């Protein structure tokens, strides 16, 4: 008699998509129904959506991360800390940098995104562009170093205190919100008058926060301008250099700190593996499988789905990554049992952007939120994620005070 072997489920990336898949699949499947393996670069999970806070120095980076073994049941999920180098789609295996090859029967790819440069030169060489724990830590340390350096030069250099944020989308606005909120305290700490600091947000599109409600955009811009932020809208950057940025109209802004936040493309592993893609994102089927692959799911920032109402792609968000992960957990179960798969239907509950301190803007349902009520909602959204991942215990340990 031949014993049925257990299928191998391999999950790549321990971000929103990967973590929710791993925690949900252990609940969906009974004991011994599958071998589940999770691979990620670090032994911790970090919350990308909080990273603007440690990057600006308004939160310690440890608050944004947690040990994977504290959240995922390691009796049921084998964790490998390693870097995914390639996915061999036809051979059902994945190459890892140190471990070698790992085979799978079912694959969930949730490797997140990398910065999109839109062809602008110098981004990787001269800007802060890594929205990771290490990237946030480096930007915070660099900012403080610039302040410390300013008063130690024979001729103080303006560029040390000039901060350029490229991109007035969600990430750029949330980051400048935190930085501008912290600025008076930083100036006091380093004996620097606040009026010596320059903060720019430069955006190529005709508006900040493209696609957001215009009244909320106006509220956000007014608030940030009152904190000293200068917006340059409809102003493409043509190059990032060692001295700052050059704009399309030829103007140069000297800055020692350029922060790149113009948008993302899917993880380069997607392109390397040869999946058909648009900017590193795979247009997935309704059940979230990669076209032509019955056993490969792609979710989160590596996936692309068209919103049928607007006929435009859904923006890559944690909200969608988590919802996709719940569907994928169900679909893995269905595949193993030989049942039909579920279609993924996004349920967009709203969008809230923090602006530093107790300020935020957002739309929840049909309701526009400003200021403290939006801030309350933002913190509740952050706490809800922790609850989905690790229940009340994780909210109490890592959650945010909404008041
Ligand atoms: C500052 C900021 C604020 C944001 N705010 C919001 C918000 O308020 N609401 C919202 O919905 N979205 C927000 N987003 C977007 C959101 O963070 C992403 O859409 C979400 O993280 C995507 O989830 P994911 O699972 O695809 O990838 P991620 O959560 O980025 O996880 C990817 C994981 O894969 C790992 N990894 C990457 N490459 C490799 C490799 N080669 N090998 C092994 N492991 C690898 C990474 O270390 C990471 O753990 C924000 C993003 C940023 C940067």
Image: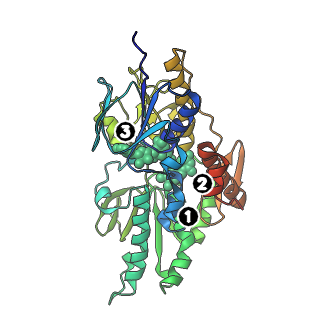
- Mark 2 — residue? 353
Q: Distance between the residues labelled 3 and 2?
A: 25 Å
Q: Is residue 98 left or right of residue 61?
A: left
Instruction: Identify the residue at the far bottom of this view.
Output: 154
Residue 263 visible in rendering: yes
Residue 46 in the image: above or below residue 7:
below
Name the residue that disc number 1 marks: 177
Cβ atoms at labels 3 and 2 below 8 Å apart: no
Q: Quadrant of residue 88?
A: top left
- Return the mark for residue 279: 3
Dot 2 or dot 1, earlier in sequence: 1
Locate residue 362 relative to residue 111 in the image: left or right.
right
Which residue is depicted at the point 37% across and 39% down? 279
Q: Where is residue 221 in the image (x, y as percent from the top left)?
A: 58, 62
Q: Image point 45% across, 40% down: which residue?
A: 301
The answer to whether the residues at label 2 and label 1 have Cβ atoms under 8 Å apart is: yes
Residue at 53% over, 41% down:
73
**Mark found first going from the N terminus, 3 or 1:** 1
Q: Distance between the residues labelled 2 and 1?
A: 9 Å
**Secondary structure category for the residue under label 1:** helix
- First reached walking from the N terminus: tag 3 or tag 2: 3
- Label 1: few (<14), some (14–19) or many (≥20) C-alpha neighbours in 10 Å: many
Residue closest to the eye, 193 or 239: 193
Q: Which x, y percent locates residue 115?
A: 38, 50
* Residue 339, horizontal then vertical, whole percent: 54, 15
Disc 2 residue lies near ligand 1 with CB under 8 A: yes
Q: In this view, does 298 lie above or below 43?
A: above
> Does any portion of residue 351 appear in the rendered image?
no
The residue nearer to you, when weighing 26 against 297, is 26
Within the image, what quadrant is residue 375 found in?
bottom right
Quarter holding the C terminus?
Answer: bottom right
Helix, strand or loop at label 3? It is: loop
């Amino acid at each position: 008699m031949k014993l049925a072997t257990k299928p191998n489920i391999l999950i790549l990336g321990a971000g929103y998509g990967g973590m929710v898949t791993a925690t949900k699949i252990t609940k969906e499947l009974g004991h011994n129904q599958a071998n589940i393996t999770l691979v990620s670069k670090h032994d911790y999970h970090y919350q990308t959506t909080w990273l603007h806070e440690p990057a600006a120095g308004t939160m310690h980076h440890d608050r944004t991360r947690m040990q994977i073994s504290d959240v995922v049941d390691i009796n049921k999920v084998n964790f490998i800390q390693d870097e995914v180098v390639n996915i061999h789609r036809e051979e059902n295996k994945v190459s890892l940098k140190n471990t070698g090859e790992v085979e799978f029967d079912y694959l969930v790819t949730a490797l997140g995104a990398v910065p999109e440069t839109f062809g602008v030169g110098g981004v990787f060489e001269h800007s802060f562009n890594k929205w990771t724990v290490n990237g946030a830590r480096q930007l915070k340390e660099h900012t403080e170093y610039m302040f410390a350096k300013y008063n130690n030069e024979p001729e103080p250099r303006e560029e040390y205190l000039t901060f350029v944020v490229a991109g007035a989308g969600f990430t750029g606005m949330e980051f400048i919100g935190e930085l501008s909120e912290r600025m008076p305290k930083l100036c006091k700490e380093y004996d620097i008058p606040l009026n010596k600091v320059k903060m720019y947000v430069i955006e190529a599109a005709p508006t900040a926060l493209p696609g957001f409600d215009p009244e909320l955009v106006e509220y956000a811009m007014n608030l940030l301008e009152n904190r000293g932020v200068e917006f340059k809208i409809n102003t493409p950057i043509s190059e990032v250099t060692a001295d700052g940025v050059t704009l399309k109209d030829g103007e140069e802004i000297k800055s020692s700190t350029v922060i790149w936040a113009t948008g993302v493309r899917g993880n380069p592993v997607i392109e390397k593996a040869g999946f058909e893609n648009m900017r590193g994102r795979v247009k997935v089927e309704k059940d979230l499988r990669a076209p032509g692959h019955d056993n490969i799911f792609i979710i989160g920032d590596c996936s692309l789905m068209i919103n049928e109402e607007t006929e435009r792609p859904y923006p890559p968000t944690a909200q969608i990554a988590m919802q996709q992960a719940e569907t994928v957990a169900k679909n893995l179960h269905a595949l193993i049992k030989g049942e039909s798969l579920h279609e993924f239907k996004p349920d967009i509950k709203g969008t809230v952007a923090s602006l530093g301190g107790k300020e935020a803007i957002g739309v929840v349902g049909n309701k526009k939120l400003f200021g403290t009520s939006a801030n309350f909602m933002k913190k509740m959204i952050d706490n809800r994620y922790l609850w989905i991942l690790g229940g009340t215990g994780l909210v109490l340990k890592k959650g945010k005070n909404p008041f």
